[in-house]
Structure formats: C-alpha cells, structure tokens
C-alpha cells in the first residue's frame, strides 16, 4: 500500500510542475475583436473616434485628405502606422493615435517600436487595455511612405497567483505525504 501512495504522490506532485511549465506567457490575440481607434492633430478633439473589427489584411482606421492618407493597421499582436503624405510636404503638427478596448485575455506589459524612425516618435504610452502613440510633425521623405511597426507584449496578471484548486491540491498532496510517513513510522 505504501508503494501505491508513493506512486500517487509522485504523479500528483508533477501536476503543478506541468501546469507551470506549460502555462507560458500569454500572447496578444486581436483578430476578430472590436477595438476603438482615435486619431487627432495637435492635441485637438479626435477627427477619428470609432470602433472597428480587427481584420488582416486591411487598415482598421484611416484619415484621408486630398491625396494623403494616415492609417493604422491593427494585427494580432502588433500594429502599424502608415503615413503616405502624397504631395504634401508635412503633416503640419503632431499627430496622436489611440487604441482602446483591446480585448486581450491578459494585460499589456509593453509596447515597443519594431521598425521605423524612432526619432519621430514623441511618446508611446499604454495601460492594461489601451495604447497611445504621438508622432512629431512628420515630413515627407523623398516621397516615400513612412511606416512604424509596434509590437504589443502581454502577460496574464493571474498567472503569478496559483488558483485555489491548485493550492488545495498541494495541501492534499502534503497531507497524504504526512499520513504515509506516519504509517511507515508506525510499521517500524
């Protein structure tokens, strides 16, 4: 009987270890979700403030004036800002893009620039479910489209706290260990 209890204890002890090993860090998943996007010039009221479903490919939010377009393309775990100024020399002021109501299963822990000219970024800020990027007065560079790609990292805040059932299971395993040890000592 002691052999069976030891075998049970060993197999039960592996459950929390396996849970921790396979939990991993959460990844952002936005495709199919609805997010809110806002776009403004120079800190004024937003000229874009609407909800859009995240699809790929395609821009979820765009501001078009004459032959220029300023767009935001949301992806599963990142987003791109694309500025095609067309025949305009510059935007004329700072621009701000905000994404909110990001329905991740976990909180945003970091937003980093993956590619693009970092000197043109005034600010990147984020909360658990929103991101804001402020760009300097963007000027046309040899007629080229300018793109900035941002990566969104998330982590499940609840991951670091064991679930109550896990805690109860650990106590049960510990209790079985104590009972087994006492029976073994009594048999001697």
Image (spheres, helix red, strand yellow):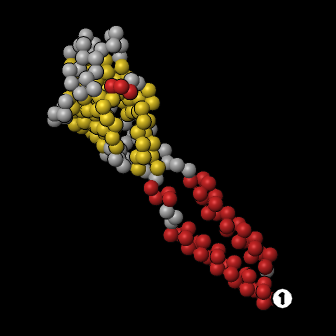
Q: Is residue 109 left or right of residue 132?
A: right
Q: Is residue 30 left or right of residue 185?
A: left
Dividing the picture into quadrants, the one containing residue 179 is bottom right
Dividing the picture into quadrants, the one containing residue 96 is top left
Q: Is residue 179 left or right of residue 139?
A: right
Badge 1 crowding class, 10 Å Cα cut-off, few under 14, some 14 to 19, many 20 or more, is few
Residue at 20% from the left image edge and 15% from the top image edge: 66
Label 1 sits on residue: 188
Residue 59: tell me if it is visible: no
Residue 114: tell me if it is visible: yes
Q: Quadrant of the N terminus?
A: bottom right
Looking at the image, which is closer to me, 50 or 43? Answer: 43
Residue at 16% from the left image edge and 33% from the top image edge: 44
Residue at 75% from the left image edge and 86% from the top image edge: 183
- Residue 73 picture location, percent across and down: 36, 30
- Residue 35 picture location, percent across and down: 32, 41
SS type, badge 1 = loop
Whether residue 74 is situated above or below residue 154 in the rendered picture: above
Residue at 67% from the left image edge and 79% from the top image edge: 176
- Residue 47 picture location, percent across and down: 18, 31
Residue lying at the far left in this picture: please name it.
45
Q: Quadrant of the C terminus?
A: bottom right
Q: Is residue 17 left or right of residue 1?
A: left
Q: How many marks?
A: 1
Residue lying at the far front in this picture: please name it.
119
């Amino acid at each position: 009987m002691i052999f069976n209890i030891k075998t049970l204890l060993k197999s039960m002890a592996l459950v929390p270890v396996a849970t921790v090993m396979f939990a991993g860090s959460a990844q952002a998943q936005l495709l199919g979700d609805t997010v809110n996007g806002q776009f403004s010039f120079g800190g004024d009221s937003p000229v874009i403030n609407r909800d859009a479903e995240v699809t790929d490919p395609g821009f979820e939010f765009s501001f078009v004036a004459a032959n220029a377009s300023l767009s935001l393309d949301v992806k599963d775990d990142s987003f791109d800002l694309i500025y095609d100024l067309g025949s305009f020399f510059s935007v004329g002021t700072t621009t701000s893009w905000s994404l909110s109501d990001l329905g991740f299963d976990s909180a945003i822990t970091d937003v980093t620039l993956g590619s693009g000219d970092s000197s043109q970024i005034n600010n990147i800020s984020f909360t658990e479910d929103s991101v804001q990027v402020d760009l300097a007065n963007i000027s046309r560079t040899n007629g080229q489209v300018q793109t900035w790609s941002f990566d969104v990292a998330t982590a499940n805040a609840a991951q670091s706290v064991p679930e109550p059932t896990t805690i109860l299971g650990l106590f049960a395993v510990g209790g079985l260990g104590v009972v087994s040890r006492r029976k073994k000592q009594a048999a001697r």
